[in-house]
Amino acid sequence: MSVIEVENLTKYYGKSRGIVDVSFREEEGEIFGFIGPNGAGKSTTIRLLLSLIHPSSGGARVFGKDVTKHGPEIRRDIGYLPSEVYYYEGMKVVDLLNYSASFYPGDCSRRIKELSDLMELEMNRRISDLSYGNKKKVGIVQGLLHSPKLLFLDEPTAGLDPLMQRNFFDLIRRENERGVTVFFSSHILGEVQRLCTRVGIIREGRIVEISDIRTLQKNNYKKIRVTGKGLKPANVKIAGSTNIQTENGTVSFFFKGDINQVLKKLGGLKVEDVSIEEPTLEEIFMHYYE
Amino acid sequence: MSANIFRHEFLSRLRSVIVWSVSVTALLFLFFSIFPGFAKDAAMINELWSKFPPELRAAFGIDKLNFATVLGFYAFLLIFVEICLAIQAGNYGFGLVSIEENELTADFLLSKPVSRLQVLNSKLLAALSSMGITTLVVWAATLLSIAVWNDGHEYDVQTLLLVMASLPLFQVFFLGVGLAVSLIVKRVRSVTPFSLGLGFGSYVLSAFSGMYSDVKLEYITPFKHWDPAYIVNHTAWNAPLVALNVGVTVVSVAVAYVLYLRRDIPAVS
């Protein structure tokens, strides 16, 4: 079942572009990565799905229901962690979390305890006294305390230290194993690579690619580095190699094609070190951005 | 309506309600405590007023009032109470949704499973309750002041009730107009300049309206729509102006609902 179905969704703020003609689907249980540079329209898409803003044209369904007509009903099962977290400054953390919980049926107190312990949250401090990272933790607990079926994470790791980031990723993975669908927006490709099964790339308001993360990597370049005395770019120049660079006796290049060709070529050379790597998403996506 | 939003909104305004209520009560007590003196030397004070330029007397509405009577005196001092009430109501109106958007907590609230209609209903009811408490305090302080400092002067209870009953509608005007304006202009960054502007602006217009009686300024200022002097002198509300006032309030609130239901909540910028 598709949890999110977006069809030709378009949003203009007056004359300025939000997103244009965006279409994609996210299936139940998926972790969908939504990648793009700042200002590409990631937040706009999420805000449209939450009906914080209204589409100029096109539409979207969440849990099979139209977001503009059934917003409140849909949002009962949605957790949202915004990129910038702002809460009522005068409130204590515990009061804010209880206020948040009061919007949902059932008792969330055990879950609040669990999550805040995990995120090492101090419950009796005022929101205004919290550092940015700690506010972010409040945001995480707040977004998860009602056990949502769908999670919107908008650049969630900004402001979290590496240890907390790991806790957070573990938490998201566990949620996902329980069947929670995750929509993960980020401009840090590494973290998307760690977590997501499928990715959509958005650029200047338009989707440029939607793909399985493995196929993206498989059908793509290998990153090859060769170190040896007197190596020159000409030594590795074969059909399929691009972006050849030399630095301190190390020649690195991207290769796309039959890997045996490379091995044959390298076999004829005297080398000190060789590495053949998967390219990072950064490197794969560079040409979408350029 | 959702009870939790109402509760949250109401509590967040509690301190402001207490401050306004105490201030307005102090104002009423302070003014009324000099009434016995005024009433005793009424002839002298009326003579003193007559030496003032007529424009000034008109601006304060002194020309239409007899300070030697309880209600004449009350009508005069009530203007100052009304300025406070107008600013308070303006604060609540302009801030009702804009504060949440400026402090960027609107995302939190509106990503909850509540409709815009529920949100606005709850917020409006909470603001009305907050204002309602201030009104009750003003009523109580009025009755108490008159009981303590009436100096044996008679007054017409029905007229007094008419004056007091005008206050809630006077406040709702500023709440409604403030709310509508806050949704019409692109963004209200700070509430106070708006509410002070609307409150004092209306008062100044009403003062000028007294000075240039031929210019029809009374149509646009709620201080004239609900002019206490008029109510005291006629033992009735000024029906056409009251109708106009209530009409503007109703239209403002309706406009606010339409705009808020379709509103794009601004993102962090």
Image (cartoon, coloured by chain):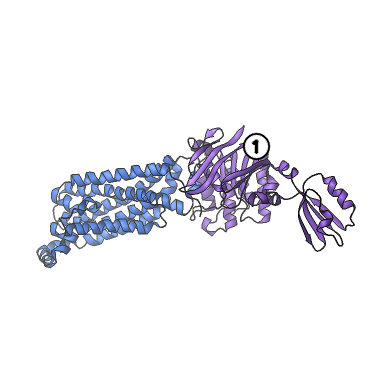
Which residue is more in the foreground, A150 or B7? A150
Which residue is more in the foreground, A193 or B105? A193
Does B234 appear above or below A212? below
Give the chain of mark 1.
A
The x and y percentages for residue B125 are: 37, 44
The x and y percentages for residue A77 are: 56, 38
The x and y percentages for residue A281 are: 70, 49
SS assignment at label 1: loop
Which residue is more in the foreground, A75 or A47? A47
Q: Which chain is blue?
A: B
Amino acid type indicated by mark 1: Gly
Task: Bin the neighbour count of mark 1 within 10 Å (Cα to Cα): few under 14, some 14-19, many 20 and up.
Answer: some
Relative horizontal placement of residue B83, taking residue B44 as reference (left or right): right
Q: Quickly name the residue at label 1.
A: A29
Question: Which color was chain A given?
Answer: purple
The x and y percentages for residue B219 are: 22, 50
Does A37 appear above or below B44? above
Which residue is more in the foreground, B113 or A191? A191
